[in-house]
Image (cartoon, rainbow, N blue to C red):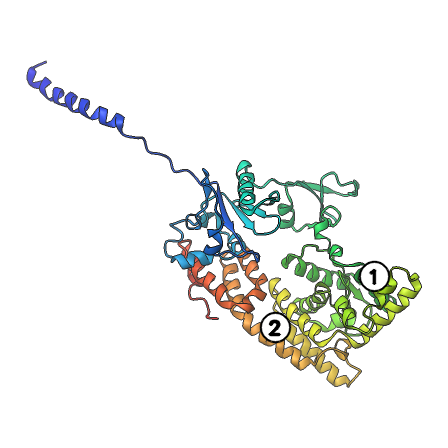
Amino acid sequence: MTARFLRPLSWLALLFGLLLPLAARAEPPVPQETPVLGVLLLDRDWNWTPRTQEALALAETPGLVRDWRQLLDPVATRNLSPEQKARLLANPRRLLASRHRTSLLKPGRLLLIAPQDPVSGLLVDLASGARQTLHAPRTNPSKARQALVRQALEGDGPEPVPVVANSESRMYHLTGALHLSTRLEATTLPDRWLAEQEGFRPCPICFPETNRLMGQDELERRLAQAAAGMIEDRYRVSHDQEERQRITSVGEHLMEANRFADQGYRFVVLDSDELNAFSVPTGPIYVTSGLLRALETPDELAAILAHELAHAENHHMRRQYDRSQWSGMLGSVLGYATRSFWGRVAGNFLADTFMKGYSRDFELEADREAVLLSLAAGYRPEDFALTLTKLGELSRQLGQGNGPDWFDSHPSWEGRVRQVRELVEKLAPLELQAETLQAHGDAELAGFLRRQGRNYLEDPSEVHAFLEAYGNLELEPEISKPLQGAPPP
């Protein structure tokens, strides 16, 4: 080789020799650690604010996100102000209902800590939606929170509780339950959450916390039994399959959509031309054949069933007893009276209740609840006003005392119709937004909003602020744009 050819190579070798030590000294890029767990500290109503988060006081831990501002994805929320980001988190359960939860929240799991005694937490897997309740030992709040975080970080996520689902009864049980019949077709599912997503309800024996009877005292249970016996003694139960299917399908959808802890109510048709409906604590819910024939749509039937469910759910029969002239008498004889004597005394109270009906405030409360329960289930609550109008007109045509029993002792139907229409008008903006979300594939969030009708009536501005922030997210444009400019409160 010639010296002229070697000279450029020498320069290149010298340059390489100078750069190599610099490259060796440069630190390799550190991969960004994916956050494993985010933590939010809630108030006693399960709501969140930046102020509640200040009391969290957790030690810095790898994979843990303590700062709420770092929970949200910066790209998806880049158009939001700090106040709007806080609005998204204000009701964590609402955000968890969004189908975009994995795009909005950076960690794989979220721990919601409630300031109860003892301190407890709800661990949510954002990808699957699986949930697990965690409990901390009784100690000071700071140590209890640290214990909950350790529990949440040590595992791979919410630990599933396998269940056995009975396809015939649509009920799920704990594996190994001795009362599960081996004759019936059953399927093992990985956890309760999946079972409920597929429409199964919990067995009240395996899961006693879901048993409505646990919320009753002995007097209310006895009143319920006596009331059911009195109704079924006066009326004959209908065995018309079409009528039974009609009332059961609407009733079960009402309970499913409203997330009742126990879906064990029974819906019974009474073979009578009367236009009437009854309920007793924890069910059954009764509707006469005559009233069924007068109801034209599932929406009208849903409103009637929701009204009676509201009586049962709000313990109106027991509360009516507490207000009545019989107050104290049944309780005093319950422990030592003969069965027949107690039955006669209870029968007098129930006959008085069925003849005079519930008090005006209980009836109006049940009407308000019927609107909210119907809305949550996706029925049109405005049809309740049509039903009340229809029954009121019939009562007027037949004359005083000859109309539907449902109006013999209830408040005036004109006032009830007015209340229902006012509620429907106030809830209309919420339903409009729920319909928009559902049309764009966010059905779970739409359902959650519908179930929040009571909170919406108290503070519609809070929901509109959430929807405005949600509509400004950098997600799919066809989803976010329809939500912009939420109706004013």
Residue 236 in view of the camera: no
How many residues crowd mark 2 within 10 Å: few (<14), some (14–19), many (20+)? many
Measured along the vertical axis of the image, is residue 196 above or below residue 231?
Answer: above
Identify the residue under disc 2: 382
Q: CA distance from mark 1 to mark 2?
A: 36 Å
Percent from the top left, x then y, of residue 442?
51, 56
Percent from the top left, x then y, of residue 80?
39, 57
Which residue sits at x=60%, y=65%? 375
Which residue sits at x=83%, y=64%? 331
Would residue 171 be found to the left or right of residue 474 on screen?
Answer: right
The residue closer to the viewer here, 27 or 282, is 27
The residue closer to the viewer here, 320 or 422, is 320
The local secondary structure at tag 2 comes to helix
Which image quarter holds the N terminus?
A: top left
Percent from the top left, x then y, of residue 414?
66, 82
* Residue farthest toward the front in the current orientation of the protein: 140
How many residues crowd mark 1 within 10 Å: few (<14), some (14–19), many (20+)? some
Which residue sits at x=69%, y=62%? 250
Percent from the top left, x then y, of residue 248?
73, 60
The residue closer to the viewer here, 327 or 206, is 327
Would residue 201 be found to the left or right of residue 88 on screen?
Answer: right
Measured along the vertical axis of the image, is residue 162 above or below residue 80?
Answer: above
Identify the residue under disc 1: 222
Measured along the vertical axis of the image, is residue 465 above or below residue 367?
Answer: above
Tag 2: residue type? Glu
Residue 253 in view of the camera: yes
Tag 1: residue type? Arg
